[in-house]
Amino acid sequence: MAYSKDVTTLHDDRSMLLDRDLSILAFNERVLDWAHRPEVPVLERLRYLCIVSSNVDEFFEVRAEPHVMGSLQGLKSGPYTEASLSALGDKTSAMVARQYALYNDELLPALQRSGYRVLSHGERNAAQRQWVRGYFQREVQPLLVPVGLDPAHPFPQVANKSLNFIAQLSGKDAFGRSNEIAIVKVPRVLPRLIPLPPRVCDGTTAFVLLSSVIRAHLAELFPGREVGHFSQFRVTRNSELSVDEDEIANLRMALRQGLQHRNYGQAVRLEVSANCAPKLAEFLRKEFQLPESSVFRVNGPVNLVRLMQLIDLVDAPELLFPPYKASFPAQLPQNGSIFTRLKAGDVMIHQPFETFDGVLAFLREAVIDPNVLAIKQTIYRAGSDPTMMDLLREAVRRGKEVTAVVELKARFDEEANINWAEQLESIGVQVVYGIVGLKTHAKMLLVTRREGRSLKRYGHLSTGNYNRRTASLYTDISYLTADPLITVDMDQLFGHLASQSRLPKMKRLLVAPFHLQADMIQRIAAAGDAASRGLLGRIVIKMNALTDVPLIDALLKAGQQGAKIDLIVRGACMLPARVAGLSENIRVRSVIGRFLEHSRVFYFCADQDESLYLSSADWMSRNMTRRIELAWPVTDPALRQRLIDECLIAYLHDRRDAWDLASDGQYHRVDLTGPGHGAQNALIQRYSASPQKS
């Protein structure tokens, strides 16, 4: 298909762009491909299967509500309509069917061949059934409260993503009434996967699903009644927290109250067993006020995410990826002073190939050094590891001024961050929550140290979070610097976040929502202008998502002017690539590997003018206009080349884990017939073999 539209019309006509929500689902199809690969260890295949289920859950919790409401209202035009929900439903149904077929037909048999079984009721022998019945009566039944529906017993509140059963009953209850529908809610405290004792397993290792245990003994919950049709079910609810920051006095308290209601938001998806009777499915659909496109039948447990427990319960290293031990950052001394090292130049840490311990070592030295006077840090998703909290506590104990900018509105981490904020305040840290109406997504840590008669600053910037766990699972770039132009910008930005005073003009940092987007558009335009004059115009961008229309406008225009553009976009991408008359000069690829791609690297070349930036921001409108984000230049020639080699060139030449976006809007895995390498594998080999310097 050829396009002749002027790209300046994109703000008004987005019909040429790819659908954002379908692109998110397409990303999950690429992740699911890992679960299909026979060369991947079986427990890792199961992990990818569970990751996709978790991602799809979050997709519905965050993205589906306007589509559902548009369908219920019968809307025929606009972004959220009956047709948009139907398209999402069709795409999701096909992917879910692939998931369950893979689970039932490949993964369970593969686990069984390795000596591990997940037994259904029909597969359990007499001894196993006896043990399961005892477990049900001892551990499960006392916690279940079946509710027979009648005017005095309305449909109970069903929590988001919880396991439940619906049963159709015959006969009469204790009062002679024939209420035929009952609901059983299953408490979250019960384990979803239960190991059977070795004495009933005949030398194998066996498990049973909680849903199978309840299903086998459902009739025992209704003595004197006969259970006819029944089904497990799960409802997914809209989980976006809505807090009007201009109308509240205490953001932390308002969020805590909002969290109490998150589990009972608008229903957006209903999952039932594949063999659920139509009458029961329709009853549930109407109860949750859902359109038919929001009902999904599944051939197995309604919550595949809970099978992640199996990976932890099975003690079989041979069924997992070989363990990777990250090397200590090659540029950092293990015994000497990091401050002294930074006086000689900037340091880059490529996580997870190099360990996050280098960042903790920087903070630890700042805590211990008596000449350090102040530590300032942003916290977005810090996780549960106590190491950083302990270091900040020790810094306060030693008399240092410690300031933490805690983002309370980090989606699905709100409660953890509220707890962080309360703990930090309790130990004497100055805690602020950033700017009203904006999320603080920038990742920075600033240390102020007295050196002689002056103060010197040392900074850490990152594309990823201060989270020890995800630092071992996500690819990110940590950047340590003593550059006074960068560190003074960091100090002024911390002041802006704390006092909400006017942000001074930055010398090195690009800050959203102030000028990051405009600067990126300017650099894209410069590359396009150079190409239009027959000079070199080159752009290579690595990020997680591309959905911001002004930036897409700029890229399309630059490509039409002749600039050669490569976009390495892990997830959602609304820019159509390789379309005649629109984007012939733009290539889009997605790399899905063992680790989650998370680093953001921006390279621009306009004739002789080259620039390279690292950033906390994806190219999404929320990052550019509704968040505090950072991008910072890398000027050291050796570090620039290292970033280009490891984060750009390696990924552009990946012939193992890469997917290219075709002109028809579909992703295709790269040709695997010839020899090729995976970027992540190459980096694993490079860093696991690199000597550690002291």
Image: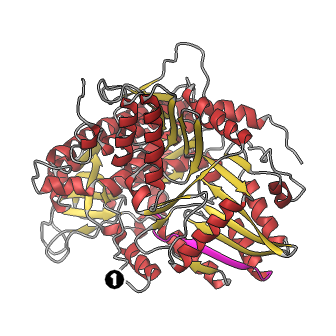
Q: Is residue 392 above or below residue 531?
A: below
- Label 1 Cα neighbours within 10 Å, binned few <14 / some 14-19 / many ≥20: few
Q: Is residue 615 above or below residue 561?
A: below
Q: Residue at x 57, y 26 (%)?
A: 654
Provide the residue designation for mark 1. 247
Give the percent coordinates (x, y) of residue 270: 26, 53
Q: Residue at x 76, y 79 (%)?
A: 400
Q: Residue at x 53, y 69 (%)?
A: 416
Q: Is residue 106 above or below residue 275?
A: above
Residue 667 or 489: which is nearer the viewer?
A: 489
Residue at the extreme top: 674
Residue at the extreme front: 533
Give the percent coordinates (x, y) of residue 599: 57, 46
Q: Confirm whether the magenta stretch covers residue 493.
A: no
Q: Confirm whether the magenta stretch covers residue 409.
A: yes
Give the percent coordinates (x, y) of residue 524: 45, 41
Side (left or right) of 529 relative to 428: left
At label 1, the amino acid type is Glu
How are the residues colored? secondary structure
Residue 48 or 510: which is nearer the viewer?
A: 510
Classify residue 220 by image quadrant: bottom left
Side (left or right) of 191 relative to 122: right
Q: Which residues are magenta?
A: 398-410
Residue 548 or 536: which is nearer the viewer?
A: 536
Q: Quadrant of the N terminus?
A: top left
Quick one: SS at disc 1? loop
Residue 559 or 463: which is nearer the viewer?
A: 559
* Camera sees residue 354: yes
Give the percent coordinates (x, y) of residue 81: 16, 49
Classify residue 693 by image quadrant: top right
